[in-house]
């Protein structure tokens, strides 16, 4: 693992699990900062990505790691309040294994180095945690290590495209002096001021 900087995904996974637990049933059809997703769709997406990045860490490649990110989100299971936090905990546990960060793996149907997959997992948890918090009116302060990994990943992706387009669409300009979370959200193509 020479040259690979690892970090603990556990704190951010726990933050997202808390947000999931705080979603009232009455908001499942409500809007989110992802125009294509209602809250229930976002929860289904979180359920799927938690399993996918758990399996990516374990190098258990198959249908869960082959689904492209633009595929329809999985149907929200009836026991989502238990299943999603459990899957998030398993994701965090899988990335505690140093082997997860080495060699190649697959996520979203894309082959990529383990350390890059971890950064993508952090980004998914940070940005979708923000989405969920904003959509459901919950307080949100992401884990610092995961936030830094997410920002670095999104910033590098935007630079590769010339600075105007990120992984999820056009970058929303945010002042340089804005909080790191706002700058990260902007790089993800979201307006940090979004409200339902």
Image: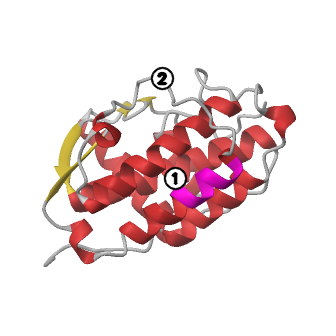
**Mark 1 to mark 2 CA distance (whole Å):** 18 Å
Q: Quadrant of residue 37?
A: top right
- Residue 72, numbered label: 2
- For the C terminus, the quadrant is top right
Q: 146 or 99: which is nearer to us?
A: 99
Q: Considering the numbered disc 2 on the image, is that residue within a helix, a strand or a loop?
A: loop
**Residue visible at 83% across and 37% down in the picture:** 25
Quick check: can you spot residue 151? no
Residue 149 lies in the magenta-colored region: no
Q: Main secondary structure of the magenta part?
A: helix
Residue 171: image location, x then y, percent:
46, 33
Placement of 6 over or under 125, stated as above or below: below
Residue 14: image location, x then y, percent:
61, 66
**Residue visible at 27% across and 33% down in the picture:** 162
Placement of 141 over or under 121, stated as above or below: below
Q: In the image, which residues are magenta?
A: 81-87
Q: 188 or 73: which is nearer to us?
A: 73
Residue 85: image location, x then y, percent:
61, 58
Q: Considering the numbered disc 1 on the image, is that residue within a helix, a strand or a loop?
A: helix
Q: Is residue 46 left or right of residue 32?
A: left
Q: 32 or 156: which is nearer to us?
A: 32
Between disc 1 and disc 2, the foreground one is 2
**Residue under label 1:** 125
Q: Earlier in the sequence, mark 1 or mark 2?
A: 2
């Amino acid at each position: 693992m020479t040259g690979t900087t690892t970090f603990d995904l556990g704190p951010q996974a726990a933050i997202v699990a808390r947000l999931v637990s705080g979603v009232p049933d009455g908001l499942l059809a409500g809007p989110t900062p992802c125009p294509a997703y209602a809250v229930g769709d976002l929860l289904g997406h979180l359920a799927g990505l938690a399993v996918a990045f758990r399996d990516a860490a374990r190098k258990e490649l198959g249908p869960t790691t082959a689904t492209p990110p633009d595929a329809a989100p999985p149907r929200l299971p009836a026991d989502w309040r238990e299943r999603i936090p459990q899957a998030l905990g398993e994701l965090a546990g899988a990335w505690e294994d140093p082997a997860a960060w080495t060699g190649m793996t697959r996520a979203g149907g894309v082959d990529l180095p383990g350390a890059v997959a971890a950064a993508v997992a952090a980004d998914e948890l940070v940005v979708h945690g923000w989405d969920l918090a904003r959509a459901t009116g919950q307080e949100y302060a992401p884990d610092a290590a995961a936030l830094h990994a997410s920002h670095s990943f999104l910033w590098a992706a935007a630079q590769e495209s010339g600075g105007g387009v990120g992984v999820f669409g056009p970058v929303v300009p945010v002042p340089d002096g804005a909080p790191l979370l706002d700058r990260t959200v902007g790089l993800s193509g979201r307006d940090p001021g979004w409200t339902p």
